[in-house]
Image (tube, grey):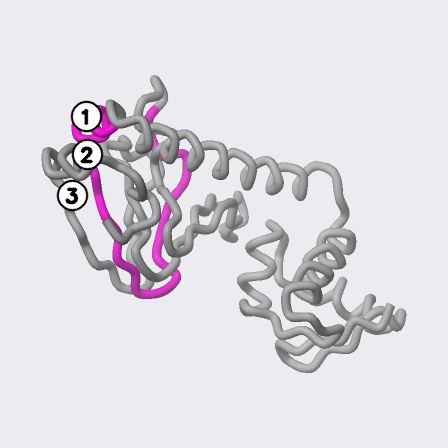
Amino acid sequence: MNIPFFAGVNQSVLEQVTIVSKKYTKGITVHAQGDTCKSMDIVLSGSLVAYALSQNGSENVLFEFCKNSIVGANLLFGNANQYPMNIYCTEDSELLHINKSDVELLLHDYQFTVNFVKSISLNSQSMNKKITIYTKKSLRENLLDYFGALSAEQNSKTIILPVSKKQLADYFGVQRPSLFRELKQMKDEGLIKICNRQIKILD
């Protein structure tokens, strides 16, 4: 009842379903590409990413799941209900698993249905942002947007990257040399200063 996703859900309905909690260690694949989606998962702690492998073997991170994120809700009732990409833990994580039949039972509760639809909508919006990154903007534009968002979040022109440069390259779907080359060019042009994970936005 303390999990935000179940806020407002009738307790008598919750008591009729089986909800399994399972812990995963960093680096473990929770769902492999091609696996059938049989449950809706709620992230209680830790973080996970959904990634696809490019032809050259690099990872393209397409989606990130943090605490209270929902995994699999958009696949559970579809005709094509196989995971289109791998999902693995980037740190030790704990997930709740609710199988399809129990989700169907919970959907009789109005508040659960509202929360379920909201989660699908949020996932779709995040994926749309990712698609925009891949189709409309250059790497520099994406980096400037990313740094700008971090600057607003950290309330400073000097920001600390929350991820490694390898993870940043994976996030933008580019090779590490391409990312390093672009960062160097931005530094040479006086746009930024770089010191490990610390970046100062100059322009």
The residue positioned 28% from the left and 32% from the top of the image is 37
Determine whether 23 is above or below 173 in the image.
below
Identify the mark nearer the N-term, 3 or 2: 3
| Front in this rendered view, residue 173 or 107 | 107
For label 2, the SS is strand
Task: Name the residue rendered at 49%, 32% in the picture.
Answer: 121
Kindly identify which numbered label has been placed on residue 16.
none
Tell me whether circle 3 and circle 2 mark residues in contact (CB < 8 Å).
Answer: no
Q: List the residue tagged with mark 1.
A: 105
The residue sitting at 19% across, 34% down in the picture is 99
Left or right, 46 with respect to 122, comes to left
Q: Residues within 10 Å of mark 1 (few under 14, many from 20)?
A: few
Verify CB contact (< 8 Å) between mark 3 and mark 1: no
| Residue at mark 3 | 19
Query: Disc 1 marks which amino acid?
Result: Leu
Q: How many numbered discs sit on the rendered protein? A: 3
* Location of residue 177 with respect to 66 vertically, above or below: below
- Percent across and percent down for residue 171 are 57, 54
107 or 178, which lies in front? 107
| Relative to 137, 120 lies left or right | left
Name the quarter where the C terminus is drawn: bottom right
Q: Position of residue 141 (x, y in %)?
A: 77, 52
Is label 1 in a helix, a strand or a loop?
Answer: helix
Q: Amino acid at mark 2?
A: Asn
User: What numbered label is drawn on residue 99?
Assistant: 2
**Which quadrant of the view contains residue 108?**
top left
Local secondary structure at mark 3: loop
Of tags 1 and 2, the one toward the viewer is: 1
The front one of 16 and 21 is: 16
Question: From which residue to which does the magenta span run?
Answer: 81-106
